[in-house]
Image (cartoon, rainbow, N blue to C red):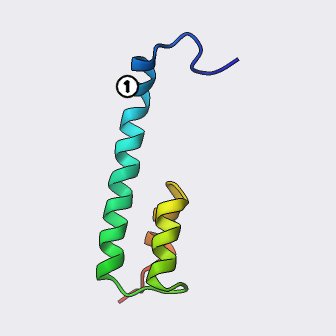
Amino acid sequence: MSIFEGMSNLEIIKLLAPLIIIQLGLVVFTLFRLVKDKVRYLPKWGWALVILFINLIGPIMYLIIGRERD
């Protein structure tokens, strides 16, 4: 049994579209910040991999612990 059982493809897309847009926006924003900011704990290329491959949690991790505080 699936949570999407009985839903058309269009309904599923409408349901998931806001989440996908938020995820993509967060990735773009954090990659932009990564270029501009000084970083802690990992080199910039390491943070880029975390941001790109650990969905949702990776960008949040960078924003919380990866940026160097002024």
Residue 16 in picture, x, y percent from top left = 43, 32
Residue 22 in picture, x, y percent from top left = 36, 47
Residue 8 in picture, x, y percent from top left = 46, 13
The residue at 59%/14% (across/down) is 5
Query: Mark 1 belongs to which amino acid?
Result: Lys
Q: Secondary structure at mark 1?
A: helix
Q: How many marks?
A: 1
- Crowding at mark 1 (Cα within 10 Å: few <14, some 14-19, many 20+): few
27 relative to 35, above or below:
above
24 relative to 15, above or below:
below
Q: Is residue 60 visible?
A: no
Q: Is residue 62 visible?
A: yes
The residue at 37%/25% (across/down) is 14
Quarter containing the N terminus? top right
Residue closest to the eye, 61 or 17: 17
Asked where in the image residue 13 lies, by quadrant, the reply is top left
The residue under label 1 is 14
In the figure, is residue 4 to the left or right of 27?
A: right
Residue 25 in picture, x, y percent from top left = 32, 53
In the figure, is residue 2 to the left or right of 29?
A: right
The residue at 49%/54% (across/down) is 56
54 relative to 38, above or below:
above
Quarter containing the C terminus? bottom left
Furthest-top residue in this view:
6
Residue closest to the eye, 60 or 45: 45
